[in-house]
Image (cartoon, rainbow, N blue to C red):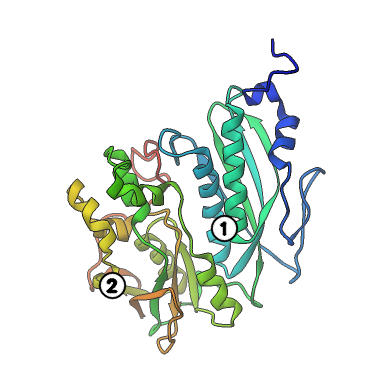
Amino acid sequence: MISSSTPPRTVGELGEFALIERINAGRTQAPGVLLGPGDDAAVLAAPRGRFVVTTDMLVQDRHFRLDWSSPYDIGRKAIAQNAADVVAMGAVPTGFVVALGCPADTPVQVIDGLADGLWAEAAVSGGSIAGGDLVRDAHLVVSVTAFGDPIGPEPILRSGARPGDMIAVAGRLGWSAAGLAALSAGVGERGEFAEVAAAHRVPRPPYRTVLDVVTAGMVPNALTDVSDGLLADLGHLATASAVAIDLDSATLADAGLVALATALDADAAQWVLTGGEDHAFAAAWPADTELPSGWTRIGMVSAGQGVTVDGVRPAGRGGWESFAGADSAQRPGSR
């Protein structure tokens, strides 16, 4: 029996409502959250009369492993992948609601770390945790719904690219896939590969690189975040815009991935082209645009369809697809 003087060790001992109170204690809401946790629902501001909304889910041993990532890392990753989708629409993240499933014997410290990570990344993106739900489950599952306030009169869609535009990216490509490879090979803890492994545990979307230029009125014709792989996500953009995209492989080389690729006898270019979960941003800009700081030109848009690299259409899938392939349920750490 747990005495009144013994701190609860698991979420089962603490109980649902005490756990909710513990998660929210001392937190400060972002300005866009008018009413946070404590009532039947949250209330968020919609100053432009509409908002952007998206949702995504992380499942233990499917999207993360507890022997590779800390609860804090998992919390940050859960928010980042949703906040990046909001920013990719040209909107500022304002609030998040989080549904959490976990076993009753989950240590309270795991939830403490998870909540700290959720709140930390929410603050980096500009929002806060407005509410959520808790449920008992056999595994740790984190589902996040994100809301955002559009900056301009219209959201930035994938469908706006035009022939003659240039393709540019902001953020790192291939690092999360490389980190997954390092962790899978058991070399992720080696000092020279620590940064790559960390990129898989916690993505670093360059939110401000997008939001600052959009706020300044410099808006790309089309925009997407790179969550499933550069080829896959640019493929979505090309399809939506009814155009073709050709990438210049020389502009995509990343010296930071060479040492790991050499150690693992792997192809760093494949990580860059097909690796997901970096949550970088790819945009189609008018050809005469002087690219803002943080953006790198990697290709061109033309009439046609599909994505090519140096004029050649790559073989195989261009990135991650949740239900593709017989092993699609056995890729822990991948999207």
The quadrant in which residue 219 appears is bottom right
Q: Secondary structure at mark 1?
A: helix
Q: Are marks 1 and 2 in contact (CB under 8 Å)?
A: no
At label 2, which amino acid type do we have?
Thr
Q: Which mark is residue 328?
A: none
Residue 108, position as x, y percentages in the image: 61, 29
Q: Name the residue carrying label 1.
A: 83
Residue 49, position as x, y percentages in the image: 76, 69
Residue 231, position as x, y percentages in the image: 34, 62
Q: Is residue 319 visible?
A: no
> Is residue 223 left or right of 265 when viewed as pictured?
right
Residue visible at 38% across and 85% down? 164
Residue visible at 73% across and 45% down? 26
Q: Name the residue carrying label 2.
A: 251
Q: Residue furthest right?
A: 39
Up the image or down, 275 lies above or below 90; here it is above
Q: Secondary structure at mark 2?
A: helix
Up the image or down, 158 lies above or below 263; here it is below
Residues packed near mark 2 inside 10 Å, few (<14), some (14 to 19) or many (20 plus): few
Q: Nearer the viewer, residue 10 or 267?
A: 10
Q: Residue furthest top?
A: 1
> Is residue 135 left or right of 173 when viewed as pictured?
right
Residue visible at 57% across and 46% down? 117
Residue visible at 55% across and 36% down? 141
Mark 1 vs 2, N-terminal side: 1
Q: Is residue 116 visible?
A: yes
Residue 145, position as x, y percentages in the image: 63, 51
